[in-house]
Amino acid sequence: MTSASATTLERDLLETPLVGALLRRRGWQLAARGALLALAIVMVLQGLYGSQLAPKNLSTLLTWVHYRGFLVLALLLVGNVFCTACPIVLVRDLGRKLVRPFLSWPRALRSKWIAIALFVGVLYAYELLDLWGDPWATAWLVLGYFGAALLVDVVFRGASFCKFLCPVGQFNFVSSTVSPVEVAVKDRAVCDSCSGNECLRGAPATPTTPARRGCELGIFLPKKVGNLDCTFCLDCVHACPEENVALTTRTPGLELADPRSRSGVGPLQSRTDLAFLAAVFTFGALLNAFGMVSPVYALQQSMADFLGVRAEWPILGILFVVALIVEPVVLLGLAAWWTRRVLARREGVLRIAVRYAYALVPLGFGVWLSHYCFHFLTGFLTFVPVLQSLALDVSGVALLGTPDWTFGGMAEETVYPIELGLLGLGFAVSLAVTWRLAAADDRARPARPFAPWAVLQSLLLVAAVWLLSQPMEMRGTFLGG
């Protein structure tokens, strides 16, 4: 039995004891979203009114150390569970009880270009404003995020903010292509005989059951392939009257080489915006890590001296343009040109670059994973004294004990091999995806189209290893200032 994405249903997590029973209940999502909303409120309040020393404030510490670490580990081990429990959805649903959405998202904007710009904008603001060290600014970023999502989703139907705007959502969507779990149909024949399409449209209330909504991101499950644009909300699980939806294990990364058209996304090889998102995701991982090692300061100073500029924003802007536009265009263009030469086809360079750009995603995720795990593993206990201090400030009594600011995490020399292992894993999956793409292009001699992209990925791997080998700032904690 196979799903719509050709994933063998070796194990359906919805059929496992305890876990499956929990996931089939709608209440757990409400509880998870409520808990994260309460935590977000505490973070915002402390960011606005608490100590403005970043290591002593939950706003900066949980946002830039713990949240990002948990995020990438969850994506690696399970999937897009943070979108599943996103507290913004709870706020949006409450807002929609007061204001009913009355517009559809404009057709001209149904792409990822705005989301890409916002994703780059967040990375730029993070560096320019030193957000990891500014609790007040981080709190306002969180408030702005909630406010923007609420404003969009009380005006536009569906999950328009999630699908077309949310920078964190795009990060999760791209990363989840290498996750080991996927929402898929159990038996396509059951879907073929279905006339209600409840997984997409939802189902009205009955005397015995409440109303159930379908996929707000417009994914028709029988034609779903992979995890792109899937928030793991499990609304399709609750809506399907035949219980024909599985949360199944699969081989990570293979969807990136799948040429089939997929519901809500279409064929990947026709989506220049998604390919550019994959490239920005990968090169952005390297740029974000580069911003935390000492050579970046020497480079910025040299650029400032050469240009006669003292303000940071134009220097940083140039670095972003070079790293996220010039480098991807040049390197992917050269690899695509080489591929075109060896295949001796008239196929355009852009079309080839779009098709192979997705193979960079596992390597890019390996860089994000290694980088964020460094901060998380070396500082995962730093929240303990912050909570102790918060309890002391609120109650005047050391309810959780006297704050001990020596709490940290694993030693850097212990974490470094883990970083290299995670990076190597991403590199291996990228090569595997590239080989499948190359085999589809040249069955007789796949090594020919494989070589250009293997060279490119090897260059990116060397750059990543060099970055991870540099002393890295342990931002937002007492461990590194």
Image (cartoon, rainbow, N blue to C red):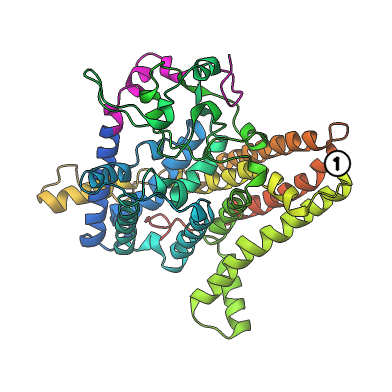
Residue 449 among magenta residues: no
One can see residue 241 in this view: yes
Number of other residues with Cα within 10 Å of mark 1, as a class: few under 14, some 14 to 19, many 20 or more: some
Q: Quadrant of residue 326?
A: bottom right
User: Where, quadrant-wise, is the C terminus in this rendering?
Assistant: bottom left
Amino acid type, callout 1? Arg
Give the residue drawn at x 82%, y 48%. Answer: 339
* Residue 238 percent location from the top left of the image: 36, 24
Instruction: Tell whether position 26 is magenta.
Output: yes
Q: Secondary structure at mark 1?
A: helix
State the residue in front, 215 or 283. 215
User: Does the image show residue 403?
Assistant: no
The answer to whether residue 36 is left or right of residue 479 is left
**Which residue, as the protein is rendered here, is positioned at the far left?**
396
Specify whether 201 is left or right of 374.
Answer: left
Q: Which residue extends farthest bottom?
A: 308
Q: Nearer the viewer, residue 89 or 299?
A: 89
Q: What x and y, as percent, mark residue 196?
A: 42, 23
Q: Which contiguous range is marked in magenta?
A: 1-29
Q: Relative to 291, is 415 above or below?
A: above
Instruction: Judge from the rendering whether residue 162 lies leftward or rightward of residue 348; answer left or right.
Output: left
- Residue 149, x across and y down, in percent: 34, 52
Magenta part, dominant SS? loop
Front residue of 454/198: it is 198
- The location of residue 87, given as percent across then percent down, is 30, 43
Q: Which residue is mark 1?
A: 448
